Image: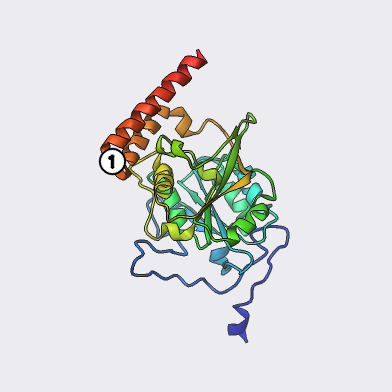
Amino acid sequence: MNDVNKFVVSCLDVGYSTTRLVTKEPPVVSKKPEDEFETVLLVPEGKGRQGEGGLRLQGYFKTSEPDKPLITVVTVVFDGEQFLEETIKSVINQTYDNIEYIIIDGGSTDGTLDIICKYEQTIDYWVSENDRGIYDAMNKGIDAATGSYLLFLGADDELFDSNVFDELKLYFMEKPDLVYGDIKYRNQQRIDSRFSIYTLLHNTIHHQGAFYHSRLFTSFRYNTFYSIAADYELNLKIYLDNKYKVIKSKGIISLCRDDGISHVESSKSHAEMNGVRKKYMSGWLNHICKLMLGLKVFLKDIFKS
C-alpha cells in the first residue's frame, strides 16, 4: 500500500504555488548518451557550504502533469536581504499550480539565509555555499532543476503579477524551446524583448523574461569565463539556428531594477558579447556587428547630450 501511495500527487498547502502539487516519488534522474550534463537532486557539496534545505530534503518532489508542465524558477543571490523576500513572494503567490523553486545562495553574510529559512516550506531546494559568480550559481540551479521550463529570476526582481505563469500555460503546452516576453523597469520603462537582427548586436532577451525548455541544457551550461554576457551566448545560439521553436508572449514577465551589472559595466558587457559573437559568427560579420554597435552607442551618446 505504501508503494502505491508514494506515487500520489498531493497538496501540502493550497495557499502557495509551490506546495499544491507534490509527490513522495523522486524524479528519475537519467542521462542519455548524447547529453553532456545531467540533473542532480542535491548539488554536490562545494567550498564553504553553510547549509541546504527545502521540500526535497523533506521527501517531497515535483513532476510535470499533462496539462500543467512543471516550471522551475531559479534565483541566485548573494547578500540580497534587501529585496529577496519580495522576489520569493512573487513566485510562491503565483496562481499557476505546478512551480518548482530553487534558490542558490553564494554564501551570504547578511540576513539572506534568515529570509530563505522563513520560506523554507515553500522552496523546493536551496543551498548556500561559495561560487565563482552569477553564472556558476545559475549552472548549479540548472543542475538541480527538474522542470520542463526554467526561468532565472534575480534576487532583486519580481514576477510582474500573480497570473504571469497562468497566462503562459497555453504557450507551454506547445512545447517550444523558448517562451519569452517583455520586462519592465521600476521607472515604468517597458523593455521590448525580441529576436531580430539586433540580436546579432547585443542581448535582446532578458533572462528574467525568458522560459527555456530543459532540453536546451542537455548540452549547454553558461560559460563562467564571462561575468556579464554568458546568457547572450544561449540567446544568440537559439537565434542563429532555425531548428529552435520560439514564441513571444504579449505580456510583461518581470519587474526589474535597471541598476544591474550589465548596465553598470556596459563597456565590459560589450566586450564579452564581442567574444560570444566571435565563437558563433564569421570574422567579417562579427567585425561589422562591432562597428554597428559602436556607431549605435556613439549616436545614443550624441542624442543624450
Outermost residue, bottom side: 1
Q: Is residue 157 left or right of residue 262?
A: right
Mark 1 sits on what residue? 282
Question: Where is residue 109 drawn, in percent x and y?
Answer: 49, 41
Residue at the (59%, 39%) spot, across then down: 183
Let me know if residue 129 appears in the view: no
Q: Is residue 224 visible?
A: yes
Seen from the viewer's position, the closer of residues 84 and 74 is 74
Which corner quadrant of the image does residue 253 belong to?
top right
| Residue 58, quarter of the rendered image | bottom right
What x and y, as percent, mark residue 40? 44, 64
Q: Position of residue 71 (x, y in %)?
A: 57, 58
Residue shown at 59% from the left, 41% from the top: 182
Q: Position of residue 213 (x, y in %)?
A: 50, 57
Specify whether 217 is left or right of 17.
left
Three-letter amino acid code at the position of disc 1: Ser
Above or below 7: residue 164: above
| Residue farthest left in this picture | 283
